[in-house]
Image (cartoon, rainbow, N blue to C red):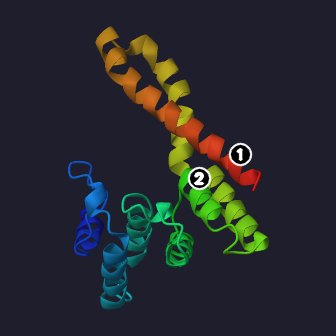
Amino acid sequence: MIKRKEFVAKSGLPLLDPFHPISPEGSDWKKADRQYRQFLIAQQGHQYLPVFRRVGSTTILKDFALLADNSEEGKQAIAFYTNELFESGGHTTAPLVYYCLEALEGTWGDDKIKEYAQQAISASTQNPELAQMRDMPERMEREKSTATTEEIKQVEPMMAKLAEIVAEQDEYVQKLRNI
């Protein structure tokens, strides 16, 4: 796992670093896009390139505010990074895909949008991490009898956050079904 993180960090993009959030002034998606594409070319064939493509695409779409750009250039870049998300494998989040597809209405045809929506729905329902999150409350309920009050108090905020993540995924899966 460390090697993958180091590889992604080599790109120079401030990828998903919660301690250094990107400021609105620093959210130049065009600069990040150039950096991303140069890194793709330089690292062609590298075993961790799919990880970079997934993380980098997510970062540029969300953190660099590409999804907020309604220009034609912005829509073309959104289309590129949406393709990157799906072609890189792994699991994409339903909310991110929903907003990408919403931005691409009128740019992509209905059939392509529906195809990507269906892929995102399938990925969400087959995501092992989400399955674990769904099972966690039941497992925790079974383990409560052997846990101390302090242990339960420590776990409750995490359980609430997991429930929030699962509910958000479910909400956006439903929205994707209605596209």
Q: Could you tell me which quadrant the N terminus lies in?
A: bottom left
Q: Nearer the viewer, residue 31 or 136?
A: 31
117 to 171, vertically: above or below: below
Say the numbered circle drawn on residue 174. Answer: 1
Q: Amino acid at mark 2?
A: Ala
Q: Could you tell me which quadrant the C terminus lies in?
A: bottom right
Q: Nearer the viewer, residue 32 or 26?
A: 26
Q: CA distance from mark 1 to mark 2?
A: 9 Å
Q: Residue at x 63, y 63 (%)?
A: 101
Say the numbered circle drawn on residue 55. Answer: none
Percent of width and height locating residue 153: 34, 15
Q: Residues within 10 Å of mark 1 (few under 14, many from 20)?
A: some
Q: Residue at x 68, y 55 (%)?
A: 121
**Rendered image quadrant of residue 72:** bottom right
14 to 169, vertically: above or below: below
Which residue carries the number 2 mark?
A: 94
Q: Nearer the viewer, residue 112 or 102?
A: 102
Percent of width and height locating residue 161: 44, 32
